Every structure is written in C-alpha cells, then in structure tokens.
Image (cartoon, grey):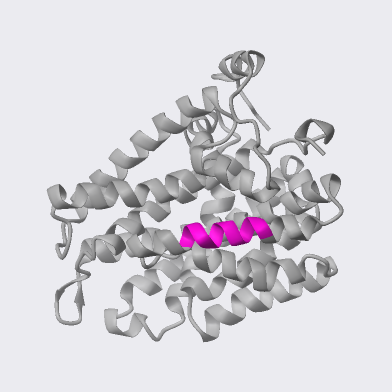
Amino acid sequence: MSDDAVTPRPRIHELDAVRGLALCGILVVDIWQITDMSATVAPGVIDPARHVLSVLFEGRFFPIFSFLFGLSFALLLDSAAQRTDRPRLVLARRLVALGVLGAVHHVFQPGEALLPYAMAGLVILLPAAGLPRWTLLIAAAAGTVGVALTLGGGLGLVPGLFLLGLAADRFGILDQLRDRGRLLALAFAVSSPAAVFAGMWEFRTPYLELWTSVVAPVAGLLGALAYLTGFLLFLRTDTGELCSEVLEPMGRMALTNYVSATALILVADPWLGLSGSTRYGSLLGSAAAIIVVQALFSYYWLRWFRYGPIEWIWRCLTWWQLVPNRCTRDERRQRAGMAGVPQRW
C-alpha cells in the first residue's frame, strides 16, 4: 500500500521542536566526549566550568531524546498497522537498519546512542508493544526510577524511557497535549524546584563520589522533566513560536543532524585544539556554530524535500521500497506560506 493510501496522523510540530532542543543539549556533551576534553584541573578536582556544564546539560537532554524515541516508535507502529499485516516486521527492519548505522557511527563516536537504541528497541520495545498500557507504565517507572537509584544513569535508563514514551502514546497524552496547559504548568512547578535542588546537590558532590552516587541520574531525570515541561510551556508564547521555527526542522532531521555533528566535531577539532584541554568556552562556541549550520541546512533542505538525507534512506529501508522524497510544487508553496505563521496551541 502506498503512503497516499493511508491517512497520516497529524504531525505534532511541538515535539519536533522539543527533539531539536534535545539535539542541541546533547551536542554540548558529545563535543567533550568525542574530543576527550579534560574534566579535571588536578587529580580529583573537577574543572569548575565543566562541572557547571555537567549540571546543566549532562543527563538532562538524553532522557528527553530517549523518551521521544519510544513515542515515535509507537506512532510508527500504529502507522505500519494501517499499511501492512506485519507491522512488527516493518519496525524490526527499521531497528536493524538503525543498528547498522549505529555500528558504523560507533567507530567514530564510541559513546554514541544509535546502536544501543536499536538493541533496546529490538529486545524491549518490540515485545512490549502489545502489553496493556498500565503494565507498560509500571514497567517504565520501574525501569527508569529503579535503574537510576540502583545502577546509575546513562544508557541503562534507555529501556525504561523507551517504555515511558510507548506508554505516553497508549494513554493518549499526545492527543490531549494541547488541552493540558494546566497539567504542564503543574508538572513544571513541581519538577523545576526539585531539579534545582538536585542540581545543587550534584554540584556540591565531590567529583570522585559522582561515579558511585545516585545524585547524577536522579538530578538528570528531574532536570529533563523540568526542561521538557518548561519548554512545552514556552512554546505557547510568541517568542516560543519563533524558537520553534528554528528547532522544528532540526528535530525533523534529528538522525541526520546527530550523525553529521560527529563529522563536524572531528573535522574541526584539529583546528580548535579541544582534545585534552579545559577550553569549555571554545566548546560552547563550537556548539553554537554547529547549531547555526544545522539549523540553516535543515530549514532549507526541508523546503525542497520531505525527509532529511539519512531519514530518507532509513525510511526506504523501513518500508523496503523507494519512498518519494522531493516536495511537489504545491508542498513547497505550502511550506513557504507556513513560514512565520503562528502555530499557537
């Protein structure tokens, strides 16, 4: 069945903007990981700038990105169920393709997330897709909070966050999102002071103790919730609408931007000299430059094409057919006309 034979679920542009925001936050951490910047100024003494950036960025945006991956998986599974009698085969093919890309990407960025995402998707998401929604929610809570309190954060949180995204779709949160402003405000009001308190706790924890303490993953999850709910509220403002116009194309091309950021960092590092240094001001400048380049590229690419370059290849492999990518003239006119039009929700 062709794409045209299926009525697509309306795209939620705010989630693309949130995904774009998460990409920007992850980029800051990726730069110091890829270039192997120094975290300490003396044995056991963390660099103050690095410590501040860790509290603001590390472990905060990765949970958002992982949650959105589980949510997107649920949306695509529902779409596949309308098009084929074997929707799980489609999703399995999609995850295998992601794993292959992740294996290649891992050569250049050992800390990358695509390969673990693919493995967790095949082992966790596919089997769990048919579970009752309350079972999904309980498993998600246990997998996220339990891991944070016992095993620490990092990639160990991925399965629980995937299930949380899947459960969010099953409970219809997306369909109710635009009518839940008060609930978002309440969640932000509760999570933001908790995130500040946990962040201060993390900042005051000695560097060597952070590796064995639960403070970092707990602070990261609280920070992620505060960032997510706060940004969704921010998108309801006039300034937020302008910000969304920049971040939404980046979020729609998240895979292309995530992989290309690694290439840009590796190419720029010999000139920037970040490797082994504590030049975190230069890191922020580099991150800003990459974000500007990717924002412009994403915006203009999506004026002419429906999907990003890697997203298009991934989609073709998912459906095992050549998917049209170039926008029609009417689509280009529509997208040009939508630029600058308020999307208040």
Which region shows up in magenta?
A: 93-102
User: Where does the C terminus fall, quadrant-wise?
Assistant: top right
Q: Is residue 341 left or right of residue 22?
A: right
In reply to whether residue 97 is colored magenta, the answer given is yes
Rendered image quadrant of residue 324: top right
Residue that appears at 83% across and 36% down: 6
List x then y, in percent, for residue 237: 57, 32
Q: Is residue 139 above or below residue 228?
A: below
Q: Is residue 332 above or below residue 141?
A: above
Residue that appears at 55% across and 48% down: 230
Q: Is residue 215 left or right of residue 342?
A: left
Q: Main secondary structure of the magenta part?
A: helix
Q: Is residue 275 above or below residue 295?
A: below
In reply to whether residue 32 is colored magenta, the answer given is no
List x then y, in percent, for residue 203: 33, 71
User: Where does the N terminus fall, quadrant-wise?
Assistant: top right
In this view, the residue in front, 196 or 146, is 146
Residue that appears at 26% across and 48% down: 284
In this view, the residue in front, 116 or 153, is 116
List x then y, in percent, for residue 120: 60, 70
Q: Is residue 143 left or right of residue 18?
A: right
List x then y, in percent, for residue 196: 45, 63
Whether residue 63 is visible: no
Residue that appears at 72% across and 61% down: 166
